[in-house]
Image: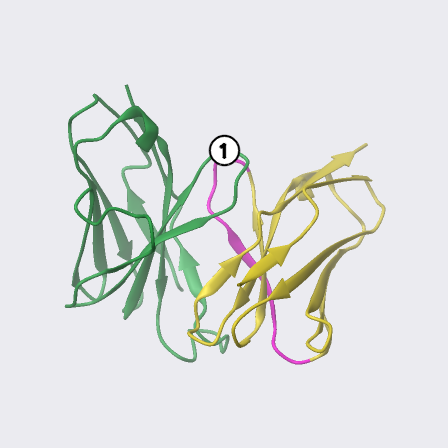
Chain colours: A yellow, B green
């Protein structure tokens, strides 16, 4: 079956760095997405990886290892506004997104 | 670019009534639109996929007679929750997809609407 695993909740301190991991098993693979979702709002796109390696975009970076079925989202210089849920989603062979349950990130001052 | 709107943003209805939610792509043509449901502290659950001019494809366990989807144009899809019950109370989110290359080079990227919170009393 198809499955996405990510931690349920993480806590970090303002100004610090946090890494949110995601492992996936899908029927075929056409890329890995990370979305940010604040409570009561729709998801917003953060990153897309289809090739192995690290993609850096400002304070956020995303890494992919296709052979390991593994990705992580790295958030640097954490700000209070980064408190949100972070959703990992893998695109399968039918170009459908398979969603993880999301990781709730709590930022403490 | 890539703006998707939903209307209404929230709605309260009585049990047994029907509610229609609209999803519009404002600045691009959406060949495919998706409807998701999200319960508190849970992830997005895909309900159905609709392509303009054809019948929607529903995910397993989603009642197509209860959740009516119409994708009448390349910019509008509607979800009608018929005979709503309290257990249908949820956050409904639509997304729209432009095509293979997306609008910014990300293949099959989905653009999300702001969501509609439905409360059935």
Residue at 16% x, 67% y is B54
- Give left or right: position of A99 versus B93: right
Establish if A104 lies above or below A96.
above
Between B6 and B86, the one nearer to me in the picture:
B86
Residue A45 within the magenta-colored segment of the rendering: yes
Q: Position of residue A107 (x, y in %)?
A: 75, 37
Dividing the image into 4 quarters, which one contains the C terminus of chain B?
Answer: top left
The quadrant holding residue B3 is bottom left
Between A3 and A6, the one nearer to me in the picture:
A3
The quadrant holding residue B13 is top left
- Give left or right: position of A94 versus B14: right
The magenta-colored residue range is A39-51
Q: Residue furthest front?
A: A1
Q: Position of residue A88 (x, y in %)?
A: 60, 57
Q: Which residue is mark 1?
A: B40
Q: Taking the image as drawn, is residue B30 in sight?
A: no
- Give left or right: position of A34 versus B15: right
Establish if A81 lies above or below A91.
above
Between B91 and A101, the one nearer to me in the picture:
A101
Between B102 and B16, the one nearer to me in the picture:
B16
Disc 1 chain ID:
B
Q: Residues within 10 Å of mark 1 (few under 14, many from 20)?
A: few
Dividing the image into 4 quarters, which one contains the N terminus of chain B?
Answer: bottom left
Residue at 22% x, 30% y is B84
Residue at 36% x, 76% y is B99
Circle 1 — which element? Answer: loop
Residue at 27% x, 51% y is B23
Establish if A45 lies above or below B101.
above
- Give left or right: position of A68 versus A3: right
Q: Taking the image as drawn, is residue B48 in sight?
A: yes
């Amino acid at each position: 079956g198809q499955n996405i695993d990510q931690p349920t909740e993480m806590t970090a301190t303002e100004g610090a760095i946090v890494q949110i991991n995601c492992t996936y098993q899908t029927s075929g693979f056409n890329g890995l997405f990370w979305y940010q979702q604040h409570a009561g709002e729709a998801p917003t796109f953060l990153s897309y990886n289809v090739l192995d390696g690290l993609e850096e975009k400002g304070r956020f970076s995303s890494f992919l290892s296709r052979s390991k079925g593994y990705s992580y989202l790295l958030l640097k210089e954490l700000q209070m506004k980064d408190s949100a849920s972070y959703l990992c989603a893998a695109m399968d062979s039918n170009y459908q997104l398979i969603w993880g349950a999301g990781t709730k990130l709590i930022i403490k001052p | 670019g890539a703006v998707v709107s939903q209307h209404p943003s929230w709605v309260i209805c009585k049990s047994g009534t029907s509610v229609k939610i609209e999803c519009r792509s404002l600045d691009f043509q959406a060949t495919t639109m998706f409807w998701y449901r999200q319960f508190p502290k849970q992830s997005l659950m895909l309900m159905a996929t609709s392509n303009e001019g054809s019948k929607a494809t529903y995910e397993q366990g989603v009642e197509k007679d209860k959740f009516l989807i119409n994708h009448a144009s390349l910019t509008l899809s509607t979800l009608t929750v018929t005979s709503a019950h309290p257990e249908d109370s949820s956050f409904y989110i639509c997304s729209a997809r432009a095509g293979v290359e997306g609008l910014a080079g990300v293949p099959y990227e989905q653009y999300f609407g702001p969501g509609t919170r439905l409360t059935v009393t």
